[in-house]
Image (cartoon, rainbow, N blue to C red):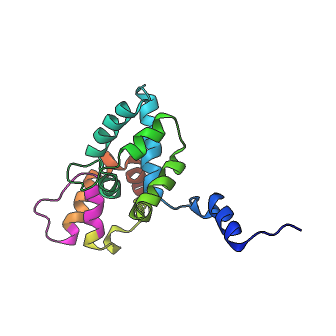
Amino acid sequence: MLYISGLSVALALTLVPSFSDALKDGECEVCVGFLERFYQSLQDDDVKFNSDSIEKALLKACKDAKGKENRFCYYIGATSDAATKMTNEVSKPMSYHMPVDKICEKLKKKDTQICELKYDKQVDLSTVDLKKLKVKDLKKILEEWGESCKGCVEKSDFIRKINELMPKYAPNAAKARTDL
């Protein structure tokens, strides 16, 4: 009869990969979303798939990142003000075409904040009543477009500015609003 000690079983179980490490649906959405677009841009721009080229492209992509994606870049050390630097945790596995979700799993083990980032819910401009939104939300729409509303004091000023800029930044929403 074969005897296996409790210690042997515990050791064996620690060597087996855990399914809990795998990302759940919707987890790490900023990491996965940003890195998928980044990976696609590398392929579109015909960048050499070596760690150095990818890291340079990552630093460049992070300069233009805004909002939650900028925060993600900060966490991996791809911004000038970042305290840590683990961009090689992205560039190296990406150089041998590791799937983005697996890269994010590895990043999650290094810093759990990375997977806590979630994109803000987008407002459907074609159906929303701008008058019912808070000024904070109106400002956020303009900020996402890279615009500001100088001299805006009243809520109606922000609404007017959004309606002015809508054909430029959200042409489908502008058209839908005129069709109502």
Above-or-below relation of 42 to 3: above
Q: Is residue 161 left or right of residue 119?
A: left
- Residue located at (43% from left, 61% from top): 124
- Residue located at (22% from left, 69% from top): 156
Q: Nearer the viewer, residue 63 or 151?
A: 63
Residue 24 appears in the figure: no
Residue 159: % across, % down? 26, 64
- Residue located at (63% from left, 58% from top): 15
How many numbered discs? 0
Residue 165: % across, % down? 27, 51
Q: Quadrant of residue 63?
A: top left
- Residue located at (46% from left, 59% from top): 108
Above-or-below relation of 9 to 100: below
Q: Is residue 149 magenta?
A: yes
Above-or-below relation of 42 to 130: above
Q: Where's the C terminus, which quadrant? A: bottom left
Q: Where's the N terminus, which quadrant? A: bottom right
Q: Nearer the viewer, residue 82 or 158?
A: 82
Q: Nearer the viewer, residue 130 or 101?
A: 101
Q: Is residue 172 magenta?
A: no
Residue 142 appears in the figure: yes
Residue 23: % across, % down? 56, 59
Residue 44: % across, % down? 44, 29
The residue range painted magenta reads 137-156
